[in-house]
Each structure stands twice: as C-alpha cells, then as structure tokens.
Image (spheres, rainbow, N blue to C red):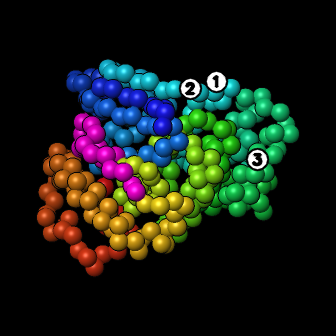
C-alpha cells in the first residue's frame, strides 16, 4: 500500500512564561493510504496536539511530516472535533454541504452528495432541522457526514464520540464503520477507549505518558465488515483488548504518578467480572 502520512522525529514544545513544555517527543509514524489508525494514551500525552499538527492547526518544533496529496482538486483533510462543531445558523442540509459550497462545487453535485449522506446517517426526517432541534448524537452524525461529504483525502477525528452516552456512541461507531467501509479514506482517530479503537481500527497505536511518544503498534486483524455486538463476543477481540490494556495501564500509572496521585494496584487489577465496556472507560 502507498504511504499517505510519514512522520519522523516529530517534537512539539510550548513555551510558557517560565519554562518549555514538551507535548510530544520524537514521534515516528507511517500511515498507509486507506488505513484506519486509532491512537490511544493517557490524558495529557499529546494525542490532540499531534492531530492538530497533522491538521495544520499547530506547527511542529522539530521533525519532518510528509503527507501525500494525491488529488489537488480535493481538500487534503477534514477534522471532526470532540465538541459539537456544526454551525447553529445552518440546518442539517446546509451544514453537510458547507465544505462543498466553499469549494464552489456545482449545486447539482452538492444536492446529490448531501442527500446521499443524510440517508447514510439516517436523518432524512431532520434534513431541514437546525442544531437546536437535534440531540447530541444527531449533531455528531452531522459532523461526521459533513467531514466525509467534503471528500477529503484524510479524515482526522479527535474523540468525536467521547461525550455521548453508550447507546448513541454505538450507533455513531456503526455509522462511521458503514461510511468508511464504503469509501476507505485514510483516518486518524483519537480515543481514550480501547474498546472503541478495536471496533474501528486497522491498527492501534499506544502513546506513552507525557511527554508523549509512540510505545507500541498493534495490528487489529479482526475481519471486516465489523458488527459491534459480534465483535465483543469474539475471543480474539478479548485477547487484543487484554494485550492493549496491559501495555496502556503502565502508562496510566506513570501519568497519575506525575500528577502526584496514588493509584492502588487493586484499582487496575483485571477483574473478569467486568464487562469490556466498563473496563475500557477506566481512568484513561
């Protein structure tokens, strides 16, 4: 597969009044065309900073980033944020078509594309609704559809489902899988949830505690198309979950220690009576 994103020796430092804070340090990463990569790590390890650098919203301090822009007629990337970021003065239809209008795409193509994505996210009855008339889950569906509709080569997603309840989260994960499996865009997805990473990704990368660098990369060799209910009962899914959590837990300990917090071993002891969904939300 062709290389889409190549990062070598990436370091980002923020200069404050009295010191220099290193957010990410010596990051090396290669992501292939059409690959879905999830990045997990303790809070404050620099995951979002890395994504913002890829989106050209921050500038690296040192290192090299090479991103292949295969079709200059299309945007290189679109970003979906954790916070609901659709425009409150636009209805669903206009929000989804916003990027296309900015690119001066023809009205017929815009209408066709918007209709396609409204159907894909199941909001046909809300096409003319405004954000204040939508639930949080619906708003995030619109955010995802808007990003895909703009037809970027790379989709950058920063914990887009973190604020949702479990039912809406599962629905949005299923919608994302459905859209991605149809289009196979390159995706870099930040999450705190091992469970979510295994459901979505071709590959999961674990970052260390602050300053963040890459500790481990694990291929998710689960078959596609994926069905969430079936995955969670798959023994191989459970083995991958245990492997990733075993590595990540060490970094969580370090992150808590750096904050002056004490974490008992019992708190993170593997308890087979927990569900995977419960364990994936432990203090990450």
Kindly identify the residue that appears in the image at 62 percent across and 42 percent down.
147
143 part of magenta stretch: no
Q: Observer-nearest residue: 134 or 232?
A: 232
Label 1 crowding class (10 Å Cα cut-off): few <14, some 14-19, many 20+? few
How far apart marks 2 and 1 lie (CA) works out to 6 Å
Residue 183 placement, left or right of 198: right
Circle count:
3
Q: Observer-nearest residue: 6 or 104?
A: 6
Residue 24 sits in quarter: top left
For discs 1 and 3, the disc positioned in front in the rendered view: 1
Secondary structure of residue under mark 2: loop
Secondary structure of residue under mark 3: helix
**N-terminal-most mark, 2 or 3:** 2
Residue 158 position within the rendered picture, expressed as x and y whole percent measured from the top left:
47, 45
Is residue 121 something that shows in the picture? yes
Residue 284 placement, left or right of 94: left
Label 3 crowding class (10 Å Cα cut-off): few <14, some 14-19, many 20+? many
Residue situated furthest right in the rendering: 108
Residue 69 - label: 2
Q: Say which residue label 3 marks.
A: 114
Residue 72 - label: 1
Residue 142 - label: none
Task: Check the image and report above or below for 204 versus 235.
Answer: above
Name the quadrant of the C terminus.
bottom left
Kindly identify the residue that appears in the image at 73 percent across and 35 percent down.
100
Residues under numbered marks 2 and 1 in contact, where contact means CB atoms less than 8 Å apart: yes
How far apart marks 1 and 3 lie (CA) works out to 22 Å
Residues under numbered marks 2 and 3 in contact, where contact means CB atoms less than 8 Å apart: no
Q: Which residues are magenta?
A: 205-221
Residue 213 placement, left or right of 59: left
Kindly identify the residue that appears in the image at 36 percent across and 58 percent down.
194
């Amino acid at each position: 597969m062709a290389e889409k994103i190549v990062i070598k020796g990436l370091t980002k430092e923020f200069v404050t009044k009295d010191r220099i804070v290193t957010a990410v340090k010596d990051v090396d990463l290669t992501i292939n065309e059409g690959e879905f990569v999830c990045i997990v790590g303790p809070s404050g390890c620099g995951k979002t900073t890395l994504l913002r650098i890829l989106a050209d919203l921050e500038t690296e301090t040192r290192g090299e980033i090479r991103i292949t822009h295969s079709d200059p007629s299309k945007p290189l990337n679109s970003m979906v944020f954790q916070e609901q970021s659709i425009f409150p003065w636009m209805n669903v239809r206009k929000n989804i078509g916003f990027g296309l209008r900015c690119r001066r795409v023809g009205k017929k193509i815009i209408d066709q594309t918007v209709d396609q994505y409204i159907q894909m996210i199941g909001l046909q009855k809300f096409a003319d609704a405004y954000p204040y008339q939508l639930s949080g889950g619906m708003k995030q569906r619109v955010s995802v559809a808007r990003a895909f509709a703009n037809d970027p080569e790379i989709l950058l997603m920063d914990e887009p489902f973190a604020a949702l309840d479990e039912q809406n989260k599962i629905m949005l994960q299923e919608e994302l899988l459905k859209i991605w499996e149809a289009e196979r865009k390159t995706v870099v997805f930040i999450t705190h949830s091992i469970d979510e990473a295994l459901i979505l990704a071709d590959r999961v990368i674990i970052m260390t505690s602050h300053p963040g660098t890459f500790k481990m990369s694990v291929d998710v060799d689960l078959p596609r198309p994926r069905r969430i209910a079936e995955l969670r009962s798959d023994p191989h899914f459970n083995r991958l979950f245990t492997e990733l959590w075993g590595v990540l837990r060490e970094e969580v300990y370090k992150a808590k220690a750096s904050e002056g917090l004490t974490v008992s071993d019992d708190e993170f002891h593997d308890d087979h009576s927990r569900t995977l969904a419960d364990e994936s939300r432990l203090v990450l």
